[in-house]
Image (cartoon, grey):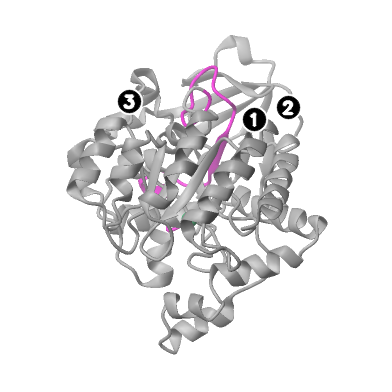
C-alpha cells in the first residue's frame, strides 16, 4: 500500500474520540466522548485523514481505492508513551532467580538488573542494536501501535547514551511509525560514578547540551526512587533540561513515596509514570499542572508489585494514560492491547477511560494531540482496524485478536496476510 488516496468502508463502527479532540479535553471522560459512529467510513489522502462519516460515502471520495472494513471496527492508532526498546541481551535467568526468592534489589546488587543490560548493550554493534529496535517496532505494529516513545537508559556513559539516541534518531527518520525519543540517562547510577548526584551533574553539563544541539530527544527522564535518584540529585539535570527547551517525563514513586509526583508537577513534566505510592499532595499538584499520570500495569504483573489505583488521580482531575513500559527486566510486555485490558481492570478505568488511555491521552503526554489520538479530519492517518464487533469487545479482548490492518501516516504497517 502506497500513501495514495484510499477509503475504508463498511466499518461496523469507528471509535473517533472526536468530542475530546473538539474540546481539547483529557479528563472526565465518559462513554459519549468516544464519538462512536456506526456503519462508518474513513477517507485518507497521503498521510492525513480527509473524511470520516457514516452511511453513504461522500461523493468526493467515490474514486478512492476501496478497503473493505466489513466485520471490523476502527480506532485511532495506539500510542505507547513509555518504552525501553534500546537494549541487547536477555535476563530470563533473573526472572528464575526471582522465582527462587531473590528480590529485584538483591539481583541488582549482584550486578544484575539494569547493569546487566548495560553490559550486553555496550557489547552490541550499531547494526545489531538497530535490527533489535526495528524488530521490536514491528511487534508494536502488530499490536496496533503507530506512535512509540523510546527511551535510552541502558548506556549510562555519555558516549553510549549518545550512541543509543543517535540510533533512535536514525530509525525515526525513515519510519512510518512516529517515534518520540527520551534521554533517560538517569536510569541507574553507573558503576564507575561516585554518586547519583555526580552522575546527574555529568549528564547536565556534558550530555544534555549535545542531545539538544543534535536534536536527539524530545524529553529527558529520570528514575526518582529510593536507591536510585532523589529529587535533589536530579535538580541540576532537570533545570538544565528546562533551560535547553527539553520536555520532562519522570519515573516516580514506584516502590515508595519519593516525592516524585510533587517533583514532576514542580518542573511541569509532561507525564509522571508508575505512581503506585504517589502522595495525595503530589496527585493534586500533578492535576493542577496538567501532568499526565501514566500507569504501567505490565510491570505490576511481571514483578508482583501493586497496581496503581487510578481513583485518586481521577478525583483530583488528572489525565490518565496506560503504557507498556516494555523493557528486558521488569516488563517484557510489548502488547499495549493486553495492557489496555489489564489496566482497565486493575487500575480501575471505565471502557471509555481505557480507550482514551492508549490513544488520546498519551498523544497529549507526547504533545502530539494536534496530530494524533483521534480519528478526525486533518489528523495523521494512524488507524487501527480490528476484526471485532464493538468497542466493548476491543476493551475486553486481552490483546488476543490480531489487527486486520494498521496504518501509520497513511502507510499500511501491518496486516496478517
Ligand atoms: Zn520505565
Distance from the alpha carbon under mark 1 to that under mark 2: 8 Å
Vertical placement of 93 versus 182: above or below? below
User: How would you rate the neighbour count of disc 3 (Cα within 10 Å): few for under 14, some for 14-19, many for 20 or more?
Assistant: some
Work out whether mark 1 precedes mark 2 in sequence or the reverse, and give the earlier one: 2
Q: Is residue 344 toward the left or the right of residue 86 in the image? A: left
Q: In the rendering, at what x and y percent does residue 69 appear?
A: 57, 36
Does the residue at mark 1 contact the one at mark 2 (Cβ under 8 Å)? yes
Q: Residue furthest top?
A: 60
Describe the element under mark 2 as helix, strand or loop. Answer: loop
In terms of depth relative to the viewer, which is nearer, 371 or 291?
A: 291
Work out whether mark 3 precedes mark 2 in sequence or the reverse, and give the earlier one: 2
| In front: label 3 or label 2 | 3
Mark 1, residue position: 409
Q: In the rendering, at what x and y percent does residue 352 appear?
A: 31, 39
In terms of depth relative to the viewer, which is nearer, 318 or 16?
A: 318
Distance from the alpha carbon under mark 1 to that under mark 3: 23 Å
Distance from the alpha carbon under mark 3 to that under mark 2: 31 Å
Vertical placement of 84 versus 22: above or below? below
Mark 3, residue position: 25
- Residue ID at (63%, 72%): 90
Q: Is residue 295 toward the left or the right of residue 402 in the image? A: left
- Residue ID at (46%, 42%): 236
Majority secondary structure of magenta residues: loop
Mark 2, residue position: 3
Where are the magenta residues, as a range? 371-399
Amino acid at each position: 500500500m502506497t500513501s495514495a488516496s484510499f477509503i475504508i468502508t463498511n466499518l461496523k463502527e469507528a471509535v473517533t474520540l472526536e468530542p475530546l479532540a473538539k474540546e481539547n479535553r483529557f479528563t472526565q471522560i465518559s462513554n459519549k466522548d468516544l464519538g462512536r459512529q456506526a456503519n462508518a467510513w474513513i477517507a485518507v489522502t497521503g498521510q492525513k485523514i480527509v473524511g470520516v462519516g457514516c452511511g453513504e460515502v461522500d461523493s468526493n471520495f467515490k474514486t478512492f481505492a476501496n478497503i473493505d472494513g466489513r466485520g471490523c471496527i476502527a480506532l485511532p492508532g495506539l500510542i505507547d508513551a513509555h518504552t525501553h526498546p534500546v537494549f541487547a541481551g536477555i535476563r530470563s535467568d533473573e526472572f528464575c532467580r526471582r522465582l527462587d526468592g531473590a528480590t529485584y534489589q538483591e539481583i541488582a546488587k549482584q550486578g544484575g538488573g539494569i547493569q546487566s543490560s548495560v553490559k550486553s548493550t555496550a557489547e552490541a554493534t550499531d547494526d545489531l542494536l538497530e535490527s533489535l529496535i526495528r524488530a521490536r517496532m514491528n511487534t508494536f505494529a502488530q499490536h496496533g501501535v503507530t506512535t512509540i516513545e523510546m527511551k535510552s537508559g541502558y548506556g549510562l556513559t555519555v558516549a553510549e547514551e549518545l550512541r543509543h539516541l543517535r540510533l533512535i534518531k536514525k530509525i525515526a527518520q525513515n519510519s512510518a511509525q512516529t517515534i518520540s525519543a527520551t534521554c533517560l540517562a538517569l536510569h541507574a547510577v553507573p558503576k564507575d560514578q561516585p554518586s547519583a548526584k555526580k552522575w546527574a551533574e555529568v549528564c547536565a553539563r556534558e550530555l544534555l547540551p549535545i542531545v539538544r544541539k543534535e536534536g536527539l530527544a524530545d524529553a529527558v527522564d529520570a528514575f526518582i526512587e529510593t536507591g536510585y535518584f532523589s529529587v535533589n540529585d536530579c535538580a541540576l539535570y532537570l533545570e538544565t533540561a528546562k533551560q535547553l527547551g527539553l520536555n520532562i517525563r519522570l519515573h516516580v514513586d514506584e516502590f515508595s513515596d519519593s516525592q516524585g509526583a510533587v517533583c514532576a508537577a514542580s518542573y511541569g513534566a509532561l507525564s509522571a509514570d508508575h505512581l503506585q505510592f504517589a502522595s495525595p499532595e503530589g496527585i493534586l499538584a500533578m492535576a493542577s499542572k496538567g501532568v499526565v499520570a501514566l500507569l504501567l500495569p505490565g510491570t505490576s504483573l511481571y514483578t508482583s508489585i501493586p497496581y496503581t489505583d487510578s481513583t485518586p488521580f481521577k478525583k483530583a482531575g488528572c489525565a490518565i494514560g496506560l503504557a507498556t513500559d516494555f523493557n528486558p527486566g521488569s516488563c517484557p510486555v510489548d502488547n499495549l492491547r493486553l495492557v489496555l485490558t489489564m489496566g482497565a481492570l486493575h487500575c480501575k478505568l471505565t471502557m471509555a477511560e481505557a480507550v482514551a488511555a492508549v490513544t488520546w491521552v498519551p498523544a497529549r503526554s507526547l504533545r502530539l494531540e494536534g496530530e494524533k489520538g483521534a480519528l478526525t479530519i486533518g489528523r495523521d492517518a494512524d488507524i487501527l482496524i480490528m476484526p471485532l464487533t464493538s468497542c466493548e469487545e476491543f476493551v475486553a479482548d486481552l490483546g488476543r485478536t490480531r489487527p486486520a490492518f494498521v496504518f501509520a501516516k497513511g502507510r499500511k504497517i501491518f496486516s496478517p496476510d
